[in-house]
Image: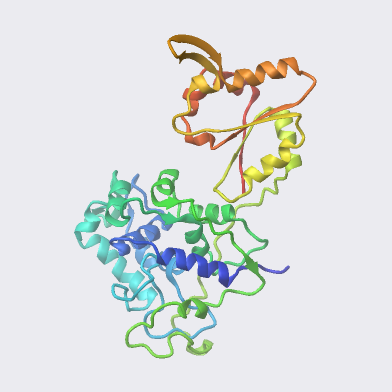
């Protein structure tokens, strides 16, 4: 069975998007993702031994700059993905050496930046995140209105992956989120979904030299960009034991016919997923099977009166007016031989419980079918 790999064009676009990111205390953000992948949370203390033993694995996905077939130089084999514009603050030692000692020393050494994020039990040699680690992390690292491009980050993390089939942007994001064990709150605080990069695939593995060509040359290095083929018998610090592929969620293979059948069965369907995953396009295809289609878009100020109905002030009098939903129900009653469809875009942007009111109970009786669109 043939394998698929992310194209160098997709990886380069992801690299360029991350390079533009302006971050303070970039090492804190870098190490945070390593700790998340290792399973550290704010809920319980875990042994700090996992850092020295296993941190090189997520660090590889985050930072490594060489293919397995290349001879790695004596230093600068990885880079902080949140500071790829220069080598000024980058560690110079090899990634494995940095992971074995530097990470633990940084977070347990009492540095001010880590005291507000990590609780360290010196007697038991355990750590966990503080209860308010997330706002403190964002204050320390992400500047005002700055967030990480979630599709760029996911593509960068998957640059060494092999795929059984071509993945969507949403699948890459889901795979990345699960690998780093990110909560919905963490995703909302750290990432943005604008500027989505649609992944492209090829049949050959990503050549890391093409990314190194985009980087400045590390100080004091020679032949760092091109390197030489690896000699296995001399490979003391090889990384071949690392599983370079992050598991992908199963493809759902949704099409308009399947979703239409779900609507017929449940009378309502919610499609969720990041921008660029063809949710609106699928709705357009589905709508062709209906006689009357009404499309609306929710926003934070959307009200119950607008959607269901209520008393409205018109000049100097107060009148009761039906909202969009009641108007559509009235029309459907008059044209009961025809099929009617209401499409709500951006449903999560409004206060849904307030907008729907008592209608929520009616919808619950039908049984909503949520679908993660990938």
Residue 243 visible from this viewpoint? no
121 to the left or right of 269: left
In percent of width and height, residue 14 lies at 49, 65
143 to the left or right of 234: left
Image quarter of the N terminus: bottom right
In percent of width and height, residue 43 lies at 35, 44
In percent of width and height, residue 221 lies at 36, 88
Between residue 302 and residue 244, name the one nearer to us: 302
Residue 255 location, quadrant: top right
In percent of width and height, residue 154 lies at 50, 59
Q: Can you say whether 351 is above or below 41 in the image? A: above
At horizontal 33% and vertical 46% (from top left) the residue drawn is: 42
Residue 324 location, quadrant: top right
Between residue 275 and residue 65, name the one nearer to us: 275
Residue 287 visible from this viewpoint? yes
Residue 224 location, quadrant: bottom left
Between residue 111 and residue 54, name the one nearer to us: 111
């Amino acid at each position: 069975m043939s394998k698929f790999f992310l194209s160098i064009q997709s990886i380069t676009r992801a690299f360029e998007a991350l390079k533009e990111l302006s971050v303070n205390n970039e090492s804190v953000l870098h190490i945070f993702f390593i700790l998340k992948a290792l399973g550290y949370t704010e809920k319980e203390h875990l042994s700090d031994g996992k850092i020295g033993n296993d941190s090189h694995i997520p660090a590889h996905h985050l930072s490594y700059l060489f293919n397995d077939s290349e001879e790695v130089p004596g230093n600068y084999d990885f880079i902080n993905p949140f500071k790829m514009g220069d080598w000024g603050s980058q560690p110079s030692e090899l990634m494995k050496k940095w992971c074995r000692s530097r990470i633990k020393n940084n977070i347990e050494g009492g540095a001010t930046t880590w005291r507000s994020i990590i609780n360290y039990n010196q007697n038991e040699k355990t750590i966990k995140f503080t209860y308010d680690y997330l706002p403190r992390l964002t204050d320390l690292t992400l500047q005002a209105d700055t967030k990480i491009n979630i599709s760029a980050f996911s593509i960068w993390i998957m640059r060494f992956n092999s795929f059984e089939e071509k993945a969507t942007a949403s699948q890459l994001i889901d795979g990345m989120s699960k690998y780093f064990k990110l909560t919905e709150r963490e995703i909302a605080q750290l990432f943005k979904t604008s500027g989505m990069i649609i992944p492209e695939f090829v049949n050959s593995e990503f050549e890391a030299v093409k990314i190194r060509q985009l980087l400045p040359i590390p100080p004091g290095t020679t032949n760092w960009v091109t390197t030489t083929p690896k000699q296995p018998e001399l490979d003391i610090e090889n990384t071949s034991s690392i599983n370079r592929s992050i598991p992908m969620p199963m493809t759902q293979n949704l099409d308009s016919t399947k979703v239409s059948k779900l609507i017929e069965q449940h009378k309502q369907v919610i499609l969720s997923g990041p921008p660029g995953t063809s949710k609106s396009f699928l709705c357009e295809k589905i709508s062709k099977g209906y006689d009357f289609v009404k499309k609306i878009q929710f926003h934070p100020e959307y009200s119950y009166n607008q959607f269901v109905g209520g008393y409205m002030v018109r000049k100097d009098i107060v009148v009761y007016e039906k909202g969009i939903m009641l108007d559509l129900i009235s029309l459907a009653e008059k044209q009961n031989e025809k099929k009617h469809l209401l499409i709500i875009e951006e449903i999560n942007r409004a206060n849904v419980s307030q907008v729907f009111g008592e209608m929520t109970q009616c919808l619950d009786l039908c049984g909503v079918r949520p679908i993660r669109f990938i």
